[in-house]
Amino acid sequence: MMSATPKKEYPQVLLANRHPDRIATLEEYRSSGGYRALADTLGAGPQDSLKETIAAAVLLGRGGAAFPAGVKLKTVADDAPFPRFLICNADEMEPGTFKDRVLIHADPHQLIEGMALTAYMASAEKGIIFIRPEYESAARILEREVGIAREAGYLGENILDSGFSFDIDVHRSGGRYICGEVTAQINALMGKRPNPAQPPPYPTEKGLWGLPTVVNNVETLCCVPHILRNGADWFQSLALTESGAGTKLYGVSGRVNRPGCFELPIGIPLSEIIEDYAGGMRDGRRFKACLPGGASTGFLPVEHYHIAMDFDSLKSVGNRLGTAAIMVFDETDCLVAATWNLLEFFARESCGWCTPCREGFPYLRDLLWRIENGQGEPEMIGALRELCRDMSYAYCAFSPGGIAPVESLLDLYEEEIVAHIEGKGCPFRKRS
C-alpha cells in the first residue's frame, strides 16, 4: 500500500526546530517565538483567563488518558495550600512509544517554557521532570538546558521580574512501567513503593507530600506555550476533524519502510500516515492490523485502515488513540505471538498490588504461550475471555489497558487462535 501522490506538508509546531543531529539551542527557540508567551503572560493578567484558554483549546492529555488539561488545571482550588508542585511525566515506558524522547532531543526549551507557564497557572513553585533511567542522554540534556534557562532568567527566583518563582529538578525513575501511572509516580517520588492509589482525593488536591500537584505528559506541556501565544481557535484549527484539536506526534514502528516519529494533524487518516510518512508497507506486504496507540490498545483491523486518527474516531470503533504509537503488522505476522510478547511485558511490570493484575497476567501469558507452542486446547479460548473479564476489575488502569490486545485478539482474530489449536502450533511459523 503506497501512495501515488506526493505527501502533504502540514504545519510543524512541536517539531518546528527539529534537527537531524542535534538539539535546538536557546537562541533558536527564542527566534521561533520561544519564551514570548512566558514574557507576555507572567504578571500580565489573571491566571483564570489563561486556564480558560487552555480549556477552550480542547488540549487533551497526550500521555494516553486524554484527560482535558484545562479541566485538570481548574481542579487546583484557589485556596489550596502551598507549596504546590508540577510533575512532568517523561517516564514513557509504554512499548512502542518514543515521542517524548524525540521532543526532548528536538527542543528542550519548549518543555521548560511549557512547565513554567503551567506552573504559573497552578501557582506551583517546584517542578520535577520524572524521566525513565534509559533516557540518560535526555536527562543530561534537560539538566544542562534547565541551567541555561535559569541563567537566562526563565527559571528560578522572580522570573523576568514578575514576582513569580519556579524551578525544575530532573529525577531519574527507578525504571518500572507502573511508575508512569500518576499516583504511583507520586509515591515513587516520595520514596514509597510505587503502588497506585485510588482517588479521591485527586493529586491536584492532595498529591506529592500531601500537597496540590499537577501531573502532565511531556507532549501536553509542550503544547501550552503555542496555545497561549497563538490562541485556542488557532490550536483547534490545526486538526482535520471537528472533534479534534492540535497536532499529534505519531510514532510508527513495525512493518513499514520508514519507522519514525511524525508531527501531523489530529484526525489524519491512518492510511496517510503509513503510506505517505512511514513509507508504506515493507517488502510490498499487506496491512493486516495495528495497535494504534501503544501496547495497551486493541488491534485495529484492516477495515479501519482509513480511519481518522483522533480520540473520538477510535473510540467510536471500540479502540483508543492512547499515545498514538502505531505498531504495524502485515499478513505474515502472528498476532497470537505478538500478544503473548506484550503479555511478557505486562506480567513483568505489574506492581503486584492487586490480585487480578498480579495473578492474571502470568496466567494469560501461560495460556497464550501454550497455544502458540502447540499445547493449546479449545477450552482455553473461554478461559482467556473469562480472565479478561475478571481482570477489568483491577485497582488501576494497568490491567484494563494490558488486556486490551488480548480482548481484541479474541474478538477480531479468534480464527487465528483456533488455527493454532487445531494445527498444534503456529501456522505462521510453519509457513516461514
Image (tube, rainbow, N blue to C red):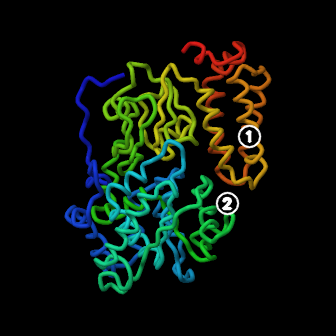
The image position of residue 186, as x and y in percent, is 60, 67
Mark 2 → mark 1, Cα distance in angstroms: 20 Å
Q: Earlier in the sequence, mark 2 or mark 1?
A: 2
Amino acid identity at mark 2:
Pro
Residue 42 sits in which quadrant? bottom left
Please name whichever residue, 370 or 55, is drawn nearer the observer in this view of the structure.
370
Q: Looking at the image, which residue is at 31% across and 50% down? A: 237
Instruction: Tell me whether the residue at label 2 lies in contact with that at label 1, contact meaning CB atoms closer than 8 angstroms.
Output: no
Query: Left of 149 or right of it: where is 135?
Result: right
Query: Left of 225 or right of it: where is 415?
Result: right
Q: Looking at the image, which residue is at 80% across and 23% down? A: 379
The image position of residue 282, as x and y in percent, is 39, 24
Quarter of the rendering occupied by the N terminus: top left
Amino acid identity at mark 1:
Pro
Query: Mark 1 falls on what kind of element?
Result: helix
Residue that badge 2 annotates: 196
> How many C-alpha atoms fall within 10 Å of the one at disc 2: few (<14), some, or many (≥20)?
many
The disc at residue 362 is: 1
Please name whichever residue, 339 or 7, is drawn nearer the observer in this view of the structure.
339
Please name whichever residue, 146 or 237, is drawn nearer the observer in this view of the structure.
146
